[in-house]
Image: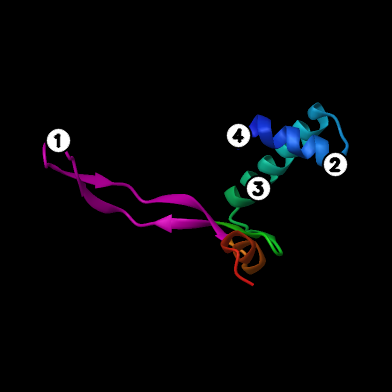
Amino acid sequence: MNKAELIDKIAKDAGVTKVQANEALDSFTTAVVMALKKGDRVTLVGFGTFSVSERAARNGRNPQTGAVIKIKARKVPKFKAGKEFATKISGKK
């Protein structure tokens, strides 16, 4: 499912226009990004938690030349599915 299909589904299920559904989805994603940038976590009970993980600096290899390269430390977004969400996906009860 891509963004347009998700917007169509939200609009249909919530009984709103596609423009309103798009604005709601954009607002949600912006709010999550801003919270993560500040170092906060976003927890949606029953769905999951968005957080930021720090990757340490490390050495890597250029696959073409085999030369050692330095990879800088960085922050990466992370999502951990909630128990209820994971159960629905796996089909287990």
Q: CA distance from mark 3 to mark 1?
A: 37 Å
Task: Find disc 3 in the rendering and name its residue.
Answer: 32
Q: Which sits in the foreground, 47 or 43?
A: 47
Q: Is residue 19 magenta?
A: no
Task: Find disc 4 in the rendering and name its residue.
Answer: 2
**N-terminal label among 4 and 1:** 4
Secondary structure mainly formed by the magenta segment: strand
Query: Counting other residues with Cα less than 10 Å from the Cα at mark 4, is it few (<14), some (14-19), or many (20 or more)?
Result: few
**N-terminal label among 3 and 1:** 3
Task: Find disc 1 in the rendering and name its residue.
Answer: 64
Locate residue 7: give its quadrant: top right
- Which segment did they paint magenta? 52-80
Locate residue 2: give its quadrant: top right
Name the amino acid type tagged 3: Val
Q: CA distance from mark 3 to mark 2?
A: 21 Å
| 88, above or below 38, in the image | below
Q: CA distance from mark 3 to mark 4?
A: 18 Å
Which of pointers 3 and 2 indicates the residue nearer the eye? 2
Name the amino acid type tagged 1: Gln
* Mark 3–mark 4 CB contact (< 8 Å): no
Locate residue 42: give its quadrant: bottom right
Q: CA distance from mark 2 to mark 4?
A: 18 Å
Q: CA distance from mark 1 to mark 2?
A: 51 Å
